[in-house]
Amino acid sequence: MRGTGTLKRPMTKIWLRNGMVIDGSGAPAQRGDVLIVGDRIAEVGRFDPPAEAITMDCEGLTIAPGFIDAHSHSDLQVLENREEKVRQGVTGEVVGNCGFSPYPAPKERRLLHDFANSIFCGSANWGWNSARDYLADVQRDSKVATVASLVGHGTLRIAQAGNRLGSLPEADVDALEQKLADALSGGACGFSTGLMYSPGASAPFEELERLCRVVARYGKIYATHMRSYASGLLESIDEQLELARRTGCRIQISHLQAVGPANWHLQERALEKIEAARAEGIDVGFDCYPYIAGSTVLTQLLPQSALEGGIDAMVARLSDPETRRRIAAETVAQTAQRWTDIFISAVGSAANRSAVGQSLAAIAEARGTEPVEAAIDLLVEERGAVNMVSFNQSEDNLRQTLSHPLSLVISDGFYVKGRPHPRLYGTFPRLLGEVSRKRGWLSLPQAIYKITGAPAARFGFAQRGLLRPGWFADVTVFDAGTVDSPADYETPELAPVGIRQVLRNGSPLLASQPN
């Protein structure tokens, strides 16, 4: 037989049968089946057995959309096809958060590496000129996740003005607007700020307003790590809501919480402000992770003016006795956590590896100094390459944010050269197990909605996040009776339990299958 075209292979059919289907909309579970043909969902519900289908018996299991991590820092690792998120049931990630994105890179890449490597866990050879270039590589190389990327304000400033702090000349702000527009037109899903990280922390309101107008013009989203989550929480929320009010942009407040026991009472008022803005017509939401501890870089404890000029300038300031005393006093004054609640999670060198897992209070005692001096010593010795885990919030406040109708649930996870926060390995199983099944803070359909349908709609994952015929076949199958994460702060890298199968675009990503 002669032909004029290439023969097409028949599309693979996968029949997930006899499961409890939770479709990602928040609707109650229904017993039923899901048929996948190729990379799409063909049918959901009850139907006749399909011919020539691979059958996965899901009796006793739950079938849900693939989970979406709406706040991640795996900008580089999504290109490495790491499995930590897949094992949790994740098939989509939003990267570029807190003002950190791997594009647009400055000509001197070291400036971007010094700024972002402690969050990205990167080497010395990464960086992309544009959103289009980065997303093209992600599209080609990332097999485990569909990736949406925010362009970071900190990276934009580094690319345009290096480590310069404060108000920028008009020509530089014009250039920031153009760089942001280029990124959004090149495929970035929105814009993020990190207003507790230098250099973004020094940006005036007027600069942010101009950039948010660009975001609104493109119909994208603005995600913000605000200026304060401690004593300045309410003022920080007011600033961000005013940006949205003036510019019309959609706003996502990142990892909302009240940090430090003295500030825990502020969270209820913060939520009232967000609810009032929503009632006013402002498109505002927030996200949170299911842990009372957070994790970031140790330099965040310092007044961000200490970081002006980059790492070399910071080390020089901290090495000058008079300047060091001033910075230490400011650090003590603004640190909301107790020193016993701040733990070192990673360092850059082997010399201080024994500090990993130790609190700043314990390190200070061993060194015969004050905790703030121990923190500064580590920053000088490691040239800023120190990460921390800090216990920030109360269980009552955590329950309030996780169960709030405007919240999404995220990992905020990032890789470190040391001991990571357990959220990198266990966020989503913990939500379904500890938070939903054991504590009863959320029903299972509510919990799944916060990690599927809601983030997909919020960040523009087209035809993903719901189990709908014709939509992409991103599916997670799990045992609702056992799903959980054993990962904790001492042993954070333990794999979750109860996740039986994960499919992205119809392709199974886990070796094991339901039985």
Image (cartoon, grey):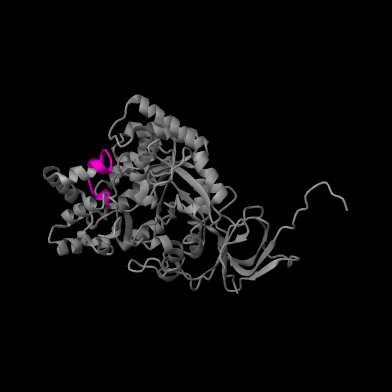
Q: Is residue 401 visible?
A: yes
In percent of the image, x 30 and y 34: which residue is there? 204
The span picked out in magenta is 298-313
The residue shown at (46%, 35%) is 216
201 drawn magenta: no
Quarter of the figure with residue 411? bottom left
Q: Is residue 261 left or right of residue 129?
A: left
Q: Position of residue 50 (x, y in %)?
A: 74, 65
Numbered-mark total: 0
Task: Determine which quarter of the picture holds residue 374.
Answer: bottom left
**Left-right relation of 149 to 301:** right
Q: Residue furthest top?
A: 171
Q: Classify residue 207 by image quadrant.
A: top left
Percent of width and height locating residue 180: 44, 34
**Quadrant placement of the C terminus:** bottom right
Q: Is residue 231 above or below residue 164?
A: below
Along the line of sight, which residue is nearer the eye, 448 or 490? Answer: 490
Front-most of 226 and 159? 159
Left or right of residue 405, residue 24 in this image: right
Q: Is residue 22 visible?
A: no
Q: Position of residue 166 (x, y in %)?
A: 27, 33
Q: Which is more toward the observer, 39 or 142?
A: 142
Q: Residue at x 23, y 62 (%)?
A: 359
Whether residue 300 appears in magenta in the rendering, the answer is yes
Q: Position of residue 496 (x, y in %)?
A: 46, 68
Predominant secondary structure, magenta span: helix
